[in-house]
Image: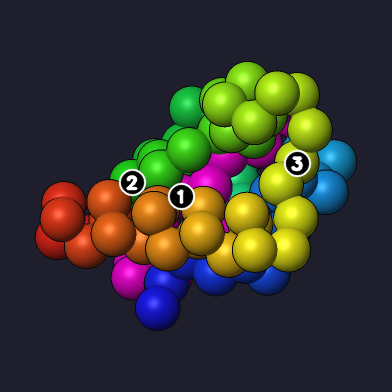
Amino acid sequence: MIITADRLRELFDSELPDPQLAVVEGEARVVPGTTDEDQGLVVASRSDLLDQHGGTAPSGEALERLAVTLETSVDTLGA
């Protein structure tokens, strides 16, 4: 499993500018959204996920479900 709840916690807690969750070389990483560098496949941004969850970071089971949903999306894309 590439996308985990721990990686999502890292995204929500990140101090990077406009942090995004990306798959780079088969590994999920939190990357800044303001760089021009190739960041691999961007899965989601913190701001988009917060918008989808009423402005607060999900926790517990909701965070686990979100990880599974994003993992399924990545698997479907073949990343």
Q: Is residue 45 above or below residue 6?
A: above
Instruction: Tell me the crowding category of disc 1: few under 14, some 14 to 19, or many 20 or more residues within 10 angstroms, Cα based.
Output: many
| Left or right, 35 with reference to 2 | right
- Badge 3: few (under 14), some or many (20 or more) residues near its Cα, within 10 Å? some
**What are the residue bounds of the magenta stretch?**
17-29
Disc 3, SS: loop
Query: Is residue 34 something that shows in the picture?
Result: no
The one nearer the camera, 30 or 4, is 4
Q: Position of residue 58 (x, y in %)?
A: 71, 47
**Magenta span includes 20:** yes
In 3D space, how far apart are the residues under numbered discs 1 and 2 (Cα atoms)? 5 Å
* Residue, disc 2: 41
Residue 63 image position (x, y, % from top left): 63, 57
Query: Which badge, 3 or 2, comes first in the chain's sequence?
Result: 2
The quarter of the rendered structure image containing the C terminus is: bottom left
Is the residue under label 2 in contact with that under label 1 (CB below 8 Å)?
A: yes
Outermost residue to the front? 61
> Who comes first in sequence, dot 1 or dot 3?
1
Viewer can see residue 67? yes
Q: Which residue is mark 3?
A: 57
Q: Mostly what secondary structure, the magenta segment?
A: strand
Residue type for callout 2: Leu
At label 2, counting other C-alpha atoms closer than 10 Å, the crowd grade (few under 14, some 14-19, many 20 or more) is: some
Q: Secondary structure at mark 2?
A: strand
Q: Which residue is mark 1?
A: 22
> Which of labels 1 and 3 is toward the front?
3
Amino acid at circle 1: Ala
14 versus 60 height, above or below: above
In the picture as drawn, the residue positioned furthest to the bottom comes out as 1
Quarter that holds the N terminus: bottom left
Judging from the image, what secondary structure is the residue with disc 1 in? Answer: strand
| Spatial separation of the CA atoms under disc 3 and disc 2 | 22 Å
